[in-house]
């Protein structure tokens, strides 16, 4: 009995947890079934700021988002229209006002997105209610920011106009036109960078006077004669021309008044509204559903978090200047592309190992710059304002190039300084040779110069070459000046040494005589001509120098390196010759004398 009771208790606990989870889910869903502000006006009612409430509702969405915004003059029934599209009553949906002051401040969304199927993909549709134009206590710049933000965020822009299309209504579309001209038809398919919102002209009017709503829109978009050259009329005519060209991106629809008593619309049921209105309203729902496409930015759709991030970027760009501009938005869209292009340029430059010659650095810079510009030309947004983004890219590339130039100069100076110090140390070492040799100095001089020319590269090479040539010339002049003096002293010491060895060590008269001749020549010549320098121009001295060079240094044997071992070995041989060799000669001279005496003594007869 214990086991069934435990199972029953576990089943009851699981059911309770499921019920609590469902209740929490229903509670969360219920909390989202209302309107939230996502953008609010600042204190001065000139700029916009984000609202945390609505952003949290959007961030929960995981599927691609499409936004439908309703714009238009204040007190034109935008909020009521959105409630009708969402099949919501006024007390549950967007707030509807009947006073002169606008009810909606900033931009609001309906917290629960409408899930639709677009080309086989699930899309979450957000409905946005915007603050009306031309209301009391606002500037025109604020209206422009509201309109610009709605135009950029939306996939479908519903332009709600009562009765007719005025000049001011067309002028209001200047930003949307400019935005569409920058991006419209930019690229297609998977490479779509940013697709401007489709425009739906919604004319709320009972009688069209025998015209279709599309004819009414077409007539409103025809150029107005401007014989007086009025600047405002020219600007509006340019907007008309642009809207006519982009006619395939806009649609017109008429909607009759729902009831004569507009202040009581929220209290009326569908059956109490005008039948024609109800019919046209349902047709409008179908039209809106057919025009919905997910928002595409930088080639991909946006989920909730990405949509909020995109909203923040656009709002920052629109608030940047005194007046919102398309150029600031183009810069926002191109910001990511500029970063990618700059990354490509930097990666190509990093391949070069510094230091390098200036010509090579410029060559690599040219190739990397061409690749970055080709990428920008392929992916950049906008037509007219893209030039500023291109200038920004060029300026950033120049900054990176300057930093690489400075780094190249530093590395070049560091390397050339190391090679210069190495050669300077080598020249100092050659100055202190124990056995002076012009051939060895020239060989070291040539190796040092060749090593410097091969390994010292970069912009610092020119200045270090000048320093190097001066240092080498100074070292050569110093060596030549000291060379003859050192060689003269060494030859004097060598001649006296040979005199001692010839007389006392090897006892070779010819060696001793040659050494005396060298010593007398060196000492007598300098005494006769008062200076040793005059000796250096004597042919005999040249012959002595040639012999000295042949003995002291050759590619095979360097006596300066082996001077001490050779002196030690020769000293050892001299001692051996003097001591061990002399003892052997004495032994050989004594033994025969002893043998002779033995033989002579043994030849005599022995006596007692």
Image (tube, rainbow, N blue to C red):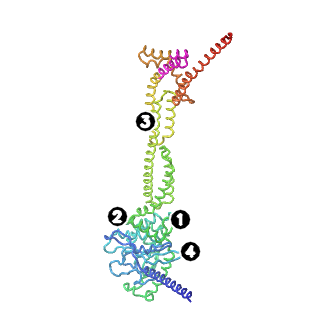
Earlier-in-chain disc, 2 versus 4: 4
Earlier-in-chain disc, 1 versus 3: 1
What residue would you read off at disc 2? 322
Q: Where does the magenta region start and end?
A: 490-515
Number of marks in picture: 4
Q: CA distance from mark 2 to mark 1?
A: 34 Å
Q: CA distance from mark 3 to mark 4?
A: 75 Å
The reply to whether the magenta stretch includes residue 290 is no
Q: Position of residue 346 (x, y in %)?
A: 48, 53
Task: Please tell me which residue lies in front, 472 or 515.
Answer: 515
Residue drawn at (51%, 39%), measured in percent from left and top?
Answer: 454
Earlier-in-chain disc, 3 versus 4: 4
Q: CA distance from mark 3 to mark 2?
A: 58 Å
Q: Which mark is residue 120?
A: 4
Q: Looking at the image, is mark 3 or mark 2 nearer the viewer?
A: 3
The quadrant in which residue 603 appears is top right
Label 2 CA crowd tier, 10 Å (few <14, some 14–19, many 20+)? few
Q: Which mark is residue 188?
A: 1
What residue would you read off at disc 3? 467
Task: Please tell me which residue lies in front, 251 or 150.
Answer: 150
Q: CA distance from mark 1 to mark 3?
A: 62 Å
Q: Which mark is residue 526?
A: none
Assign a secondary structure to mark 1: loop
Label 3 CA crowd tier, 10 Å (few <14, some 14–19, many 20+)? few
């Amino acid at each position: 009995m214990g086991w069934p009771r435990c199972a029953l208790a576990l089943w009851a606990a699981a059911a309770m947890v499921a019920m609590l989870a469902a209740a929490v889910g229903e509670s969360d869903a219920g909390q989202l079934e209302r309107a939230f502000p996502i953008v609010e006006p600042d204190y001065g009612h000139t700029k916009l700021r984000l609202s945390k409430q609505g952003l949290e509702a959007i961030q929960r969405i995981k599927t691609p988002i499409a936004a439908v915004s309703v714009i238009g003059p204040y007190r034109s029934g935008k909020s009521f229209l959105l409630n009708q599209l969402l099949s919501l009553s006024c007390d549950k949906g967007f707030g509807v006002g009947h006073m002169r002051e606008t009810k909606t401040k900033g931009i609001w969304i309906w917290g629960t997105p409408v899930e639709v199927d677009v080309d086989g993909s699930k899309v979450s549709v957000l409905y946005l209610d915007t603050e009306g134009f031309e209301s009391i206590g606002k500037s025109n710049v604020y209206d422009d920011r509201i309109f610009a933000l709605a135009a950029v965020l939306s996939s479908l822009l519903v332009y709600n106009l009562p009765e007719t299309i005025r000049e001011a209504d067309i002028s209001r579309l200047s930003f949307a036109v400019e935005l569409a001209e920058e991006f419209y038809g930019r690229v297609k398919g998977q490479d779509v960078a940013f697709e401007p919102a489709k425009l739906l002209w919604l004319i709320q009017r009972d009688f069209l006077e025998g015209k279709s709503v599309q004819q009414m829109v077409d007539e409103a978009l025809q150029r107005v004669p401007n014989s007086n050259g009025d600047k405002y009329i020219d600007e509006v005519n340019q907007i008309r021309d642009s809207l006519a060209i982009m006619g395939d991106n806009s649609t017109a629809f008429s909607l009759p008044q729902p009831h004569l008593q507009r202040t009581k619309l929220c209290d009326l049921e569908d059956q109490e509204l005008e039948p024609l209105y109800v019919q046209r309203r349902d047709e409008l729902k179908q039209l809106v559903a057919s025009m919905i496409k997910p928002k595409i930015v930088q080639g991909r759709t946006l989920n909730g978090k990405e949509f909020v991030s995109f909203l923040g970027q656009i709002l920052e760009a629109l608030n940047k200047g005194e007046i919102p501009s398309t150029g600031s938005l183009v810069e926002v869209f191109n910001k990511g592309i500029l970063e990618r292009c700059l990354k490509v340029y930097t990666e190509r430059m990093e391949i070069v190992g510094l230091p390098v010659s200036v010509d090579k650095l410029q060559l690599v810079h040219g190739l990397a710059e061409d690749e970055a510009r080709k990428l920008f030309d392929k992916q950049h947004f906008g037509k007219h304002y893209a030039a500023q983004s291109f200038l920004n890219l060029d300026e950033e590339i120049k900054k990176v190039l300057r930093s690489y130039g400075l780094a190249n100069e530093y590395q070049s100076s560091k390397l050339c300084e190391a090679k210069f110090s190495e050669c300077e140390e080598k020249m100092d070492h050659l100055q202190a040779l124990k056995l002076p040799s012009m051939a060895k100095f020239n060989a070291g001089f040539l190796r040092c110069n060749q090593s410097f020319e091969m390994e010292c590269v970069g912009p610092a090479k020119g200045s270090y070459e000048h320093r190097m040539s001066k240092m080498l010339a100074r070292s050569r002049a110093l060596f030549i000046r000291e060379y003859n003096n050192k060689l003269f002293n060494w030859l004097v010491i060598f001649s006296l040494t040979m005199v001692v060895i010839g007389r006392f060590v090897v006892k070779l008269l010819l060696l001793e005589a040659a050494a005396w001749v060298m010593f007398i020549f060196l000492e007598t010549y300098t005494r006769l001509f008062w200076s040793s320098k005059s000796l250096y121009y004597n042919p005999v001295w040249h012959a002595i120098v040639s012999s000295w060079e042949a003995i002291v240094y050759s590619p095979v044997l360097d006596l300066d390196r082996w001077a001490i071992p050779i002196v030690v070995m020769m000293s050892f041989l001299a001692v051996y010759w003097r001591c061990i060799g002399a003892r052997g000669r004495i032994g050989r001279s004594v033994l025969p004398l002893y043998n002779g005496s033995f033989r002579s003594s043994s030849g005599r007869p022995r006596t007692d």
